Amino acid sequence: MTLLLFAGSLLGAMALGMPIAFALLVSSLSMMLSAGGIDPQTVALQMINAADSFALLAIPFFLLAGEAMSAGGLSRRLVGFALALVGHRRGGLGHVAIVAAVLLSSLSGSAVADTAALAGVLMPMMRRAGYDAGRAAGLMAAGGIIGPIIPPSIGFIVFGVAGNVSITSLFLAGVAPGLMMAVALALTWSVVARRETVETLPRASWSEAATALKDGLLALGLPVIILLGLKFGVFTPTEAGVVAAVYALLVGIVFYRELAITAVPRVLLSAVRTTASVMLLVCAASVSAYLLAIADIPAEVRGLLEPFAGNRTALVAAMMAIVLVAGTALDFIPTILILTPVLMPIVRSAGIDPVYFGVLFVMNNAIGLITPPVGTVLNVASAVGRVPLGRVTVAVVPFLLSQVAVLVALVLVPELVTVPLRWLR
Amino acid sequence: MIAGLAARALAVAEWLLALALAAMLAMVFGNVVLRYGFNSGITVSEEVSRILFVWVTFLGAVAVMQRRGHLGFDLVVRALPPRGRQACRIVSGVLMLVCCLVFLHGAWTQTAMNLANAAPVSGLPLGLAYAAAVVGAAGLALMVAADLLGALAGREPPPPHHEAEPGA
């Protein structure tokens, strides 16, 4: 009953067109009303306590790192690094995009930023070489969503805090599945781009390649520091965020000299804005999550999932189906925040590893970024790549299917997530 | 004129928040360096960073609101005729105003209660963090009320600020 009220009032308020953060508050108020009355203290305390969190401080730091990366030229050089590695191969620019997507995602936690960086550098080159522009943009959108799976990842931070799961474990667990997504994309690309007649790039001269590799290695120092630091418990995810931000600023300002000191305030401002809009959602969602928890939603949902009792694979598959459907129409962070308090009690009571579930859940939500009608990353690929949205939406389908196939494989064989995690931990 | 004044005040506030982020960066990074380099640390840095973070969250939310940058879902509303869109805007304005006022009421009480309580390490009053919620709730309420008045007077809403989805 409470669940129905929560979902109904939330969707109703969203349909009116108000910001989702407010729709979450409206649904909280309606749950309070039905439970006896509105308590302003609960609203305020939940909102404030949600923001008063050292773990969530990782969000502004990683966002700042991302902004500094693109303003400081790290993103561009990583694409150049991938170009020097595989650019001369047959169908090469597509593989460059995939390698670059993996490199970018190991520095940034954002699918939107990764897609923009990829499309900005590679789309003009792919057009000139004669690739189908729609297909190229579709590939970059699908490559961009590896961003939230390979650490760092804003999605993992938000899920970890909302679901009370170790963010460090989530980060380490995301590495292997992210690489699997990249392999799936590369295979798909080899098939769909087989018949394209394009010019291959000349192999870069040794000195050019050396410069690109040297520049790229400097940028790649960062993910190495982050991963090793987290693995050996040298720092918390929040401190990893701060190290990432300082490193990105330092490399952009001192080594590449692309980020002027005078431009730093703009970078900070931009990170503040994104942080504030993510955090208002987090705060509003914590009110409804609290009300759901005290209304014993877990028991209600367990009833709904009775048919799956005893079969974890079927249960995970059912939850993934729900997330996939929700993800087509809902945005990334809101879906995570809305569904985590509903699904986590089931996950825990069914004895499913929360870290394993978190990886699948965030990957599923990332896939939602390239499904219409609301596919933010498709919009970015279309806008930055200058390809009509309709063409990108059609062209992304084979890549989308290959990533759904990875998701299905992870549902069927949990060891694909848990075994590599054991090596990394 | 009031709108212009509000915009300017928020622009100043945003730069202060950017400064706050720089301070948070310096404090938390300083702590990491001190811990590994010098086996010491600034004990207050975590507490102060968190207070600043609460301000970034709530005061920042007002600034984002002013730019109409909060994530929404407009597929339904866009499909409606102008009158229906107008009605939705008014209803959602009223509901949002109720949310802001409930939040403001609670935040105010909590701030008053916590003004005298000191944070465990820094000794700063806990009310400092709660005050951010008061400012944020009041700011959001004013924004929503202004938009609601505009809707009632039949003025078109300013175009939303299209930025890529935050955090995705």
Image (cartoon, rainbow, N blue to C red):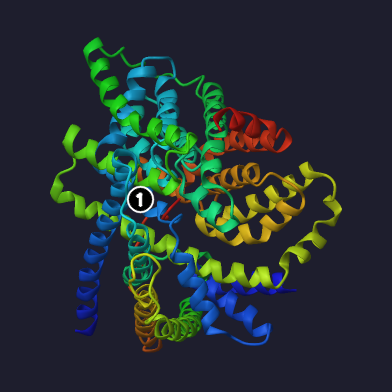
> Which kind of residue does numbered mark 1 sit on?
Phe
Percent x, y for residue A82?
36, 24
Against A82, residue B8 (above or below) is below
Against A64, residue A250 (above or below) is above
Against A299, residue A217 (above or below) is above
Asked if one can make out residue B28 in the rendered structure from this viewpoint, the answer is: yes
Against A285, residue A125 (above or below) is above
The residue at the point 25 percent across, 11 percent down is A205
**Image quadrant of residue A130?**
top left
Percent x, y for residue A276?
38, 63
Percent x, y for residue A267?
25, 51
Q: Is residue A153 left or right of residue A7?
A: left
Q: Chain of mark 1?
A: A
The residue at the point 20 percent across, 70 percent down is B12
Which SS class for mark 1?
A: helix
Split into 4 quadrants, where in the image is the C terminus of chain A?
top right
Tag 1 residue = A61
Split into 4 quadrants, where in the image is the N terminus of chain A?
bottom right
The single residue placed furthest to the front in the displayed view is: B39
Toward the viewer: B90 or A272?
A272
**Image quadrant of residue A220?**
top left
The mark total stands at: 1
Q: Is residue B43 left or right of residue B81?
A: left
